[in-house]
Image (cartoon, grey):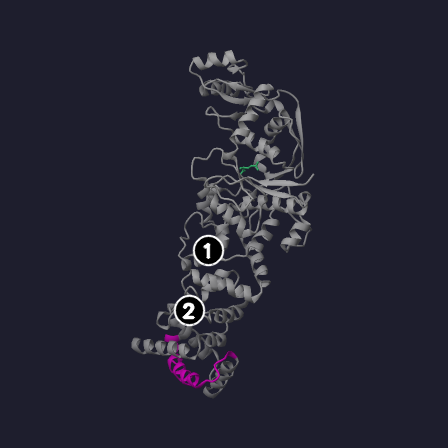
Amino acid sequence: MSVRTRFAPSPTGFLHIGGVRTALFNWLFARQHGGQFLLRVDDTDEQRNVEAALEPILHGFEWLGLDWDEGPEPGPGKRSRGDAGPYYQSQRNDLYAAAVERLLASGHAYRDFSKPDESQAERDAAQAAGEPFVASRRFAAETEAEAQRYLAEGRTSVVRLKMPRAGTLVLNDLVRGEVRFDWAREQDHVIQRADGSPIYHLATVVDDEAMAITHVIRAEEHLSNTPRQVFIAASLGYRPLQFAHLPYVAEPGSKNKLSKRKLDKYLKNRDFASLNEYGARIAQRLGIEAAAETFNPVIVDFYEQTGFLPEAVLNYLLLLGWSFDDSREDFTRAEMIESFSLERVNKAPASFDPAKLLNFQERSMQLVPAKQKTARCVEVLKRAGMLSDPPPCDAAQTVGKIVAAAGDRIRTYGDILDYDYLFVPDDEVVYDSKAWEKRLVKPADAAPLLAKFRDTLAEASPFDAASLETLLKSFVESQGIAIGQIIHALRVAVTGQAVGFGMFETLEILGQQRSLARIDMTLRRLAAAG
Ligand code: GLU
């Protein structure tokens, strides 16, 4: 039987990093076994616009290259990828209703006509007596006549499972090993609401059977739901499933669960500083609202926006709770598929480590061919409005030179925006005031040396990095000065910044005319300031 896994997101409006880890493990497991990976939208109790809330999730999957298999006809207004889903639970209500009828008929479920305060009173009494709550089933309608009588009293009903009251469920979880549950501790869980809508536990079991799922790989928080789901499946005569409950992803340096409810906290959290600062810098240039909750290192979209590589994010997530051995960390997509195993998933939670994720990104970026890096940087510059769209025909060449000169400084594609000074018109260069003061105003010889070197530069031909280096060296010698006396002033004059990549490459990329124009402007401003 072929391996079939599924990821079942609720349409929340964003793709959480912990959710992606779950999806990745499902995807890897299916791909490794030549099986199928299905996407199924848990939208049984969604009032809002599911499509809009799903869009960022599907987009995240596409960005990460986690492709899913098969699906139904999408139905009006529903999105799908060709014939490959996702499935929507909201379109499958008939199946769930039929399953509820079967459970009622076989006596594995009952219509409960108790009022909420009546069941609550039973619960409170059990708690006061320090005993586990056991539903009295006092308002269970066993026959149609009883049901009619309750209805006549103005009562409504939900459908509850008639759970076993004794015995043990032994679950062999592929991650957690043997887990035992006392049936007596289970309550008579609701599977259908008064309005006839199904509860997730029922829907998921019906779907896992209908979709021939073999392995349920999901978050640990669902472990406690498993007994009732196993009960439903067994009562309906379904095949047993293999379960693998993944430990949760914890906050950096902590055992607390990374939570969607704490998104705003993560924007201020010290441990996330490296990513948040990063994001803020890039967001500002791209006009993204950096303080927005969804522009958050806990949400996948953050990484796409800031120009991370999907393979780096996936590789990092792979090791978040899984290890191959004690040392190997880097995996290509094919190697991930080949090496993954549920046996090597850790039982303990793994904490999210922003610095480590950045390291993965840096290493992955080093493997990207120059041409691809350039093309992606061009895209980012276009998004930031620094290149016209379509870009000028020499854009690829210029950006290619910047990419080569910047080297490892470009850790994500967003880093190209650090070199915005190369793209702005000469009279719009923004001068860092500290650098201006320190390198141009304070040293008394800065302006005269810059003026002299300007004249040398005006004669330079050819205007390439190697020739410019020779030129500057002989200028330094002829003036009897240290190289530091001119090079810092020159950098601030042409870039506005204290730091950047190689000075000679910077000049070559700007070209002779623009370099001279910027020096002239600097000299005029210095003179004007007296
Ligand atoms: N919608 C559930 C979740 O997001 C799915 C749980 C499951 O995989 O069964 O946690």
On screen, residue 499 versus residue 83, left or right, reads left
| Distance (Cα) linking label 1 and label 2 | 21 Å
* Residue 228 drawn in magenta: no
Q: Residues within 10 Å of mark 2 (few under 14, many from 20)?
A: some
Q: Report helix, strand or loop for mark 1.
A: helix
Q: Which residue is mark 2?
A: 423
Question: Which span is picked out in magenta?
Answer: 440-465
| Along the line of sight, the residue nearer the viewer: 504 or 348 | 504
Judged by its main secondary structure, the magenta piece is helix
Instruction: Please tell me whether residue 179 is drawn above or below residue 67 in the rendered image.
Output: above
Ligand 1 picture quarter: top right
Instruction: Please tell me whether residue 367 is drawn above or below residue 123 in the rendered image.
Output: below
Q: Which residue is mark 1?
A: 279
Kindly tell me whether residue 108 is visible in this rendering: yes
Say if disc 1 is inside 8 Å of ligand 1. Answer: no
State yes or no: discs 1 and 2 in contact (Cβ < 8 Å).
Answer: no
| Along the line of sight, the residue nearer the viewer: 349 or 42 | 42
On screen, residue 82 versus residue 445, left or right, reads right
